Image (cartoon, rainbow, N blue to C red):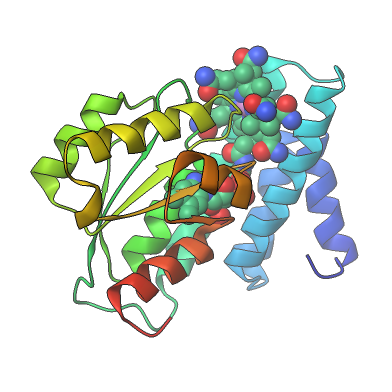
Amino acid sequence: MSEMTEQESQLVNLLADMNEDEAVALAKRMLLEEGADPMRVLELCRKGMDIVGKRFEEGEYFLPELVLAGEMLENIGAIAKPLIKQAPGSEPKKIAKVLIGTVHGDLHDIGKNIVTFMLDINGFEVKDIGVDVPVATFVDEIKDFNPDVVGLSGFLTLAFDSMKETIEAIHGAGLRDKIKIMIGGGQIDETVKNYTGADAFGSNAIDAVTLCKNWAGVAA
Ligand code: B12
């Protein structure tokens, strides 16, 4: 991310240091009083989460801190999201259908929720089927909803196998050729994409929108 102002690094540090009240208050002030770009604020949150994740890995933080981090993110997201909705360029007509969920074994959903939201405001009809979604549920939902694109989200390393299993099951059900599959989440890259058999991966919500627009033949 580009260089941060003093205020921006203050927000990142408040998040990283678990100062919930102050972090939320500062984000609120930036967004509602100072007109900060909501996408930029979400990016700062992500940066804060990277530090939290690192401290967790190093044994400085434990599960309660991860839970609190998730809470802070939800709170700031709730303030930021309606402001994004006001951005111009959102299309009233639905471009294509996207089914999205977090694969089985994985409960992380904040990133997926941002993707869902961004697809929605960019004109896609999105069905979000939640977290820890069993393989069979994905297959049933595809039959039922008939999406053009399926998005699989996962933040844990074990999610790679869940994604692979899910895509194999979609293939086994004879549905693979009808849909495009994108994957995303914390540690997803080209290698994981190839391992799972997905069509593409995205590192953030903007990528998800770009992929879906390209597949739908709409200028991104
Ligand atoms: C918050 C958090 C939690 C919260 C989640 C709350 C929630 N409702 O989601 C809770 C406390 C529940 C949690 C639990 C656990 N967590 Co956790 N968690 C995190 C943390 C700190 C932030 C994740 C997050 O939400 N980031 C914010 C979002 C916005 O980030 P983002 O990546 O930028 O999101 C974008 C992309 O991912 C992309 N995207 C997402 N989905 C999709 C889908 C598609 C199709 C596309 C194209 C794009 C896309 O778009 C998003 C928006 O731009 C991360 C650390 C980190 N740095 O990520 C650890 C982390 C993911 N957790 C980790 C671990 C280990 C766990 C636990 C196992 C801990 C434990 N011992 O119990 C449990 C697992 C529970 C389970 N079965 O899933 C590890 C995973 C390590 C690994 N290699 O597997 C991490 C990396 C921390 C670490 N460094 O060790 N966690």
Q: Quadrant of residue 64?
A: top right
Residue 75 in view (yes/no): no
Could you tell me how many numbered marks the image carries?
A: 0
Quarter holding the C terminus is bottom left
Q: Closest to the observer: 181 or 115?
A: 181
From the viewer's perspective, is residue 62 above or below residue 38? Answer: above
From the viewer's perspective, is residue 12 above or below residue 161? Answer: below
> Residue, x 76% and y 41% (percent of image)?
50
Residue 61 falls left or right of residue 67: right
> Residue, x 66% and y 45% (percent of image)?
24
Q: Closest to the observer: 81 or 55?
A: 55
Q: Residue furthest right?
A: 6
List x then y, in percent, for residue 201.
51, 54
Q: Quadrant of residue 214?
A: bottom left
Ligand 1, seen in the image, is in the quarter at top right
Residue 41 falls left or right of residue 173: right
List x then y, in percent, for residue 7.
84, 61
Quarter holding the N terminus is bottom right
Q: Closest to the observer: 62 or 20?
A: 62
Residue 202 in view (yes/no): yes
> Residue, x 37% and y 66% (percent of image)?
212
From the viewer's perspective, is residue 20 above or below residue 68? Answer: below
From the viewer's perspective, is residue 117 above or below residue 58? Answer: below
List x then y, in percent, for residue 154.
51, 36
Residue 154 falls left or right of residue 60: left
